[in-house]
Amino acid sequence: MRLNHYVQTVLLLLMAAGSCAAQHGWLSVHVAPGGQDLNTVYFLDSKRGWVGGDNGFLSRTDDGGRSWVRQAVTTTAAINDIYFRDNEDGVLIAGNAIFATTDSGSRWSEARRFLPSEFDGATVELYSVRFPSKKKGWVVGSVSKQDRVVDSILVYTADGGATWTRERAPSRRELIHIDFDNDKRGWIVGAGGTIIKTVDGGQTWVTQTSETTATIYHIDVRDDKKGWAVGERGTILRTIDGGEHWEPVTVAVRSTLLNVQFLNDDDGWVVGRGGTILRTEDGGRSWVQQESSTKQNLYALFFNKKIGWAVGGDGLALRYER
């Protein structure tokens, strides 16, 4: 009997260990109904976060992702990005409209909509929003006629999002993502290998040489020297001199890469189409493919300290704990 009890105890310990081991890596979490893509994920802290997607879908968690509650936004367009400049004030973009909250995301109201009548009948699609300071913010996107991009759009606020003014970018190509590492230095990336930089808070923007024609979907810049950008056909670009030179990094995938985030100078992640997840631990010099257990496209990535989230096609959300 003692032997049997010992064996049972060992088996239970092994099962528990196996269960714990199975929890490592990226795990699927139920956030949204299937059939619609999730395009963006954002966390204010370890508890409060949002995911946004097709048909105006917005869901919020207040317990670190254990439970999610649908929130109302007066749009049926795809929510493409969410960003908070402090604990209370945030912005999301959906289709041709900007929505704002002043109560930590409990309620969202339309702040600005760009109508076809303002663009000679063309349609505006907004993709990315960032606030380098509490009052100053930027949004980028494209202007299209009959599914053909005819111009870029770059809009600016100096009053916390109460009013938005269009600025001219030095490119008419589709602008997809914007990032700042302080209130002066910012970068925009987009179609045809476009990389644009400002060092004066957006008063002027200058085109940088990327040495690629691949569409660049996302950029992450940590300081005045180090940055990474990702895009079509497995494109990863790395700079160590503030973008004066962007060098390609060879990776063993050819899928389109859609989002990159670095946790520190060494540890970084990339997600993309077909369930692609890549990780680097040497500052982006080399990348190793990770197991995602999905073939769904992964559109967005967000790490908050040790917890990571990736969202994508068919309502998919993945959670990672280091």
Image: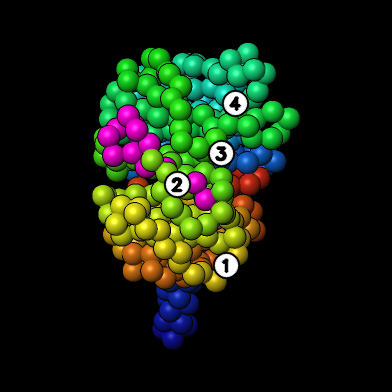
Confirm or deny contact between disc 4 and disc 3 (CB under 8 A): no
Q: Amino acid at mark 4?
A: Val
The Cα atoms of the two marked residues, 4 and 2, are separated by 21 Å
Q: Earlier in the sequence, mark 4 or mark 2?
A: 4
Q: Is residue 288 visible?
A: yes
Q: Which residue is mark 4?
A: 124
Mark 2 residue element: strand
Q: Amino acid at mark 3?
A: Arg
Coordinates of residue 135 in the picture (x, y in percent):
29, 23
Q: Which residue is mark 3?
A: 173
* Circle 2 residues within 10 Å: few <14, some 14–19, many ≥20: many
* Circle 1 residues within 10 Å: few <14, some 14–19, many ≥20: some
Which quadrant holds the C terminus?
Answer: bottom left
Which span of residues is magenta-colored? 193-205
Coordinates of residue 252 in the picture (x, y in percent):
55, 71
- Image depth: mark 4 or mark 3 in front: 3
Q: Is residue 101 visible?
A: no
* Circle 3 residues within 10 Å: few <14, some 14–19, many ≥20: many
Q: Nearer the viewer, residue 192 or 42?
A: 192
Q: Earlier in the sequence, mark 4 or mark 3?
A: 4
The Cα atoms of the two marked residues, 4 and 1, are separated by 32 Å
Q: Earlier in the sequence, mark 1 or mark 3?
A: 3
